[in-house]
Each structure stands twice: as structure tokens, then as C-alpha cells.
Amino acid sequence: MNAWALGDFREDLTAERRPSAATLRRYGELGRRASDAGVPLAELVDLYLSTAWRGVSAGQLTLRIIDDIVSTVTAGYVAAGATWSRQVEARRRELVDDLLAGSVTGHTTGSAEALGFRLAQPHALLAVAALRELTDADPAGRVVRDGLHRRTREPVLAAAKDGLLVVLLPVVSDGGVPSRVALTRPTIGVPELADLAYALVERAEPTAGWQVASSRPRPGAAAVATSWQEVRQTLDLAHRLRLPDPVLPAGRLDAYRLLLQDPAGATRLAEEVFAPLAAVRGGAEPIVSTVLAVLDHGGNTAAARVLHVSVRTVLYRLERLAELTGRSLDEPADRFTLYCAAMAAQLSPGGKEVVVAAVGR
């Protein structure tokens, strides 16, 4: 280690008087310089102590001098590290904001490369949601970033945005299709990474109501904004559809996205299919819920359990559905139409209330 890190330590020891405030400020600056130079703190402390043991006889005053100087050097070192850490976090925050907004410039690319990201290669984006809004101060960010980095040995960006935790990871192409993250062997797919992110936060806080959405892998910095919109829409759809799944790959909800591409048409479908249910006592909503429960949970018995009604009630509602609409869950084409109409009702801004209002006109 260079002698500069000691400053006037030997002379200050032999002077046999406690250092002044100005002298201690010099040692604090030495600690900051050592931190900036990448000197490990343990080596720096060992340098001072070994110099003291070799150079002087350890009287009580001398030990106080050593303690004053070494403590100040260490404090300067730690302060420099904290400043550097804040600067890195600020750069991460700025980079995430720029990428999610689609503001990709030369500065953005340079900042990414300084943090170890090569934005030209594909990426995967995860969005982590909880029952509360997540912020940069939330420990979930550190838990996910550190946990995924340990598993992947790749740089991981994690920052809060709009109440969600956003996580960006580099990926590689697998057989021409960008589908697997570049990891230590064996490789792990993006869905497995989303599973890992969920496991990390769930273990840290089991009652937070976590949900993780993962984007399709995409190349290029400009595609980060596209991935961000995809995972946000995935979480929004999951909320509106009341999906309990803890992990949601974006591709799983593509059929629902098609309904959203024509919201007026989707609402019209729901109204036309369920309009005849206006004659049913209690309205359309119980029958619409029954249709979804039967199709989502695989049969009448499971639906009855979910709806907290008897199987006989489920059968009665389905009979009334067939009688009034001419559509039956026993017919594949009808089953598809009924499910799409029920989904359209849930995806409408007013939810199933849209259907209730429509059939009541």
C-alpha cells in the first residue's frame, strides 16, 4: 500500500499530544482518498495499527492518539463509501426513469454501460406489486436485486415506479428466440426468474399480497418502455379479473388483451349475450358469476364451493341461462362465446355492473 495513506501518522504519534481538529480533518480526507482508490478498509486499518505497534511504545496517551486518528480515518472512509453508494443509486434511479419513459439518448446508454448494462442486448422486465405502494426506500427492492444477482451473476436494476418495483435483467437469445436469461449454468428461463423474485419477497414478508408480472424478452434500450407497458397492463388485467396467481407471464393474458383492443365491441358482446337475463330474479350478475366459476374452476361442484352455494343452485342458474339465452356450457361454441362475454363484462370500466345496467334497460 502507498505511504500516502498514512500521512503524518508517525510524526503525530511521536509528538505525544492528541491531534487537533484540523489534523483530524486531514485524516478524514485520507480515509476518503483511500476509499476512492479502492483500498479495502481492513487493510487501511491494519496499516495504521501495524505502524503504531512498530514505531512507538504504547503508553496510555499514545493509545488515545491511535484511537483518535484511526477512528477518524475509518469515518472518512465510510463517509466516502456512503457518498459513492448514493451516487450509484441516483444514477440507477435516473436510468430507470429514462428507460421506462422511452427517453433513450447517448447519456442513457453511457449511464447503463457504467452500471454494467449493455442495452443493445435483449432484456426481461419484472414488475412486483404488493397490497401497498412500493417506494425506493422499501426493502423489497434490495431483497429482489441482491437475490437475483446472487443467482444470475448479472447486473440487476431495481427501482420503484408508480407504486411498483421494476426489475430489469439482461437476457440472451436461445436458438434465435430470446427466451433465456444469461446465467451461471444451468440456464434459467424468465418465468423461473419471476418465480424466484416472488419467492424472495414472499419469504421476506408473507402477508404483503405479492404479485409478479414478467415481460417478453426484447432487445434494445427503446424496448424497455414497451416491456414496462406490458407488465403494467398485465398487473392491471390481473386485478380486474381478480386473478390470484402470484406470478403472471405477460403472454398468459394475451386473449384478454384482444378484448381490450375493441372495448366498445367487447361491451356490446356482453350486453347482447346477457340481455335476456333481465327476466331473472336477482338480475344477470349471479348467472354471469356462475358461468365464470364453472369455467374457471372446472365444473359445477368446484363452482358451487367457490360461490358458497349448493350444486343444485349452480345447475338451476345454468338451466335458466340456457332457457333465456339459448346458449349452453355443454356446447363448445356457446361455451367460448359465454366466456368471452363474461370476461368482457369484467374488463369493462364498470365491471359486471355494465351487464347489470345493460340488461335492466
Image: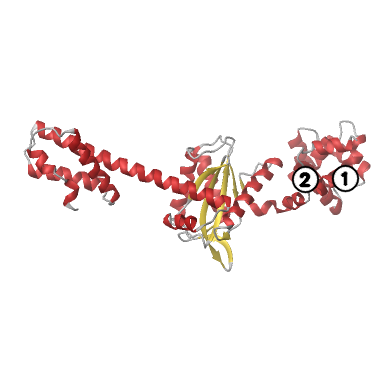
Examine the rendering and report whether any part of residue 319 can be seen: no
Determine the residue positioned at 21% across, 41% down. Answer: 27
Choose top left, top right, bottom left or bottom right for residue 245.
top right
The three-letter amino acid code for the residue at tag 1 is Val
Task: Return the mark for residue 146.
Answer: none
Q: Which residue is mark 1?
A: 273
Crowding at mark 1 (Cα within 10 Å: few <14, some 14-19, many 20+): some
Q: Is residue 253 visible?
A: yes
Q: Secondary structure at mark 1?
A: helix
Left or right of 63 in this view: 45: right
Q: How is the image coloured?
A: secondary structure
Calculate the distance from the C-alpha at mark 2 to the C-alpha at mark 1.
12 Å
Do the residues bearing badges 2 and 1 touch, measured as CB atoms within 8 Å? no
Give the residue pinned by disc 2: 343
Q: Position of residue 217 (x, y in %)?
A: 58, 58
Image point 15% across, 37% down: which residue? 66
Along the viewing direction, whichever of 127 and 108 lies nearer the viewer: 108
Residue at far bottom of view: 175
Compared across the picture, whether 339 is left or right of 226 comes to right
Q: Is residue 320 above or below residue 215?
A: above
